[in-house]
Image (spheres, helix red, strand yellow):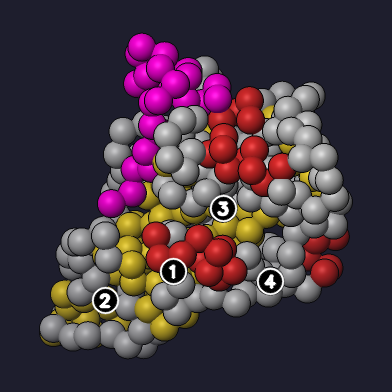
């Protein structure tokens, strides 16, 4: 991996996150570079709001004025305790101005996402995190709604990229991605950029890749039965919802909720357009659930 800086300086990046050589042409020498801003412009689709007809995600949360101006992951980390996946390293507290949510069309904002840069050698080690935004066409952008996501003060080199969403299973790049002076733009909506693990994403008949929807208790898996299963979380959220004085299971809860799997701004356990059906179908029709059993577990494929 070769980079050329101003002043005829040449930089050759070696394995991991180390710089092998730098210096002037014809006179390279071992060196260490100072941290720089690293930018990424990944692309993913979230299964919950995805519309196969127009190949875009719905922006119902934005259209209904429900997307918060501050990233939600710090608060989710507090709510779900020590086993949650949203521990910020360097990032956290990102905010947007209301005008960012005025954008319409394919670049309209769908929701917040959570990004991690992980070590090239030990992908379980998180080096940096950022909260960012995802557009209807799958582009992940910084808090201005249009620019690549910047990780400040990071060493240039190779990283695994992790992308998480608050009610979808996260994914990690199978291969390392070179981050340096140029913006990396991996597209995880097709099989061309592979993800770590086995069936880390749902695949549509046309080959489109979608992040699995239904992890509404942030335990990095999707389950229908057993302790802390996602259907029970949805049911309890509805029964205990403010205003549901009769504890009705067909109560409709409007707002920005983690149990709103299709992300249309309404959370429903029973009835038309309910949020339980996508969870059930994902488990029962999962390609590895050959026996079609209710206790199958879709496990997130991140080390």
Would you say residue 104 is visible in this rendering?
Answer: no
* Residue located beneath label 3 in the image: 166
**Which sits earlier in the primary sequence, circle 1 or circle 4?**
4
* Residue located beneath label 1 in the image: 87
- Residue closest to the eye, 135 or 12: 135
Q: Which mark is residue 11?
A: 2
Residue at 18% over, 85% down:
31
Q: Position of residue 64 (x, y in %)?
A: 86, 51
On whether residue 283 falls in the magenta region, the answer is yes
- Direction from residue 161 to residue 248 in the image, left or right: right
Measured in 3D between alpha carbons, the distance from the residue under mark 1 to the one under mark 4, in whole angstroms, is: 16 Å
Q: Secondary structure at mark 2?
A: strand
- Direction from residue 225 to residue 19 in the image, left or right: left
Measured in 3D between alpha carbons, the distance from the residue under mark 4 to the one under mark 3, in whole angstroms, is: 14 Å
* Residue located beneath label 4 in the image: 70
- Residue closest to the eye, 257 or 170: 257
Q: Which residues are magenta?
A: 280-303
- Circle 1 packing at 10 Å, graded few (<14), some (14-19), many (20+), is many
Measured in 3D between alpha carbons, the distance from the residue under mark 1 to the one under mark 2, in whole angstroms, is: 33 Å
Measured in 3D between alpha carbons, the distance from the residue under mark 2 to the one under mark 4, in whole angstroms, is: 38 Å
Q: Main secondary structure of the magenta part?
A: loop
Q: Which mark is residue 254?
A: none
**Which sits earlier in the primary sequence, circle 2 or circle 4?**
2
Q: Position of residue 106 (x, y in %)?
A: 74, 45
Would you say residue 102 is visible in this rendering?
Answer: yes
Q: Secondary structure at mark 1?
A: loop
Measured in 3D between alpha carbons, the distance from the residue under mark 3 to the one under mark 2, in whole angstroms, is: 38 Å
**Vertical position of residue 106 compared to residue 207: above or below:** below
Residue at 43% over, 49% down:
219
**Which sits earlier in the primary sequence, circle 4 or circle 3?**
4
């Amino acid at each position: 991996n070769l980079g050329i800086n101003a002043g005829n300086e040449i930089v050759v990046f070696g394995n991991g996150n180390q710089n092998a050589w730098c210096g002037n042409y014809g006179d390279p020498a071992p060196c260490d570079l100072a941290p720089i801003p690293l930018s990424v412009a990944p692309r993913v689709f979230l299964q919950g709001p995805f519309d196969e007809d127009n190949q875009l995600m719905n922006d119902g949360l934005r259209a209904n004025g429900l997307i918060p101006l501050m990233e939600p992951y710090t608060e989710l980390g507090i709510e779900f305790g020590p086993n949650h996946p949203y521990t910020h390293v360097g990032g956290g507290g990102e905010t947007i101005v209301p005008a960012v949510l005025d954008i319409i069309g394919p670049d309209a904002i769908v929701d917040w996402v959570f990004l991690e840069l992980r070590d090239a050698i030990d992908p379980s080690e998180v080096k940096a995190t950022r909260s960012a935004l995802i557009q209807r066409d799958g582009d992940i952008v910084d808090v201005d709604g249009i620019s690549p996501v910047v990780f400040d003060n990071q060493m240039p080199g190779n990283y695994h990229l992790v992308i998480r969403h608050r009610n979808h299973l996260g994914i990690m790049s199978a291969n390392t991605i070179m981050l340096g002076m140029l913006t990396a733009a991996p597209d995880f909506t097709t099989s061309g950029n592979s993800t770590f693990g086995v069936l880390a994403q749902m695949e549509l008949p046309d080959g489109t890749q979608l992040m699995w929807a239904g992890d509404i208790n942030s335990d990095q898996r999707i389950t229908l039965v057993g302790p802390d299963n996602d259907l029970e979380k949805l049911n309890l959220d509805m029964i205990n919802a403010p205003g549901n004085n009769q504890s009705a299971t067909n109560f409709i809860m409007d707002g920005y909720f983690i149990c709103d799997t299709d992300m249309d701004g309404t959370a429903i356990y029973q009835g038309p357009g309910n949020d339980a059906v996508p969870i059930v179908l994902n488990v029962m029709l999962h390609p590895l659930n050959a026996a079609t059993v209710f206790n199958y577990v879709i496990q997130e494929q991140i080390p």
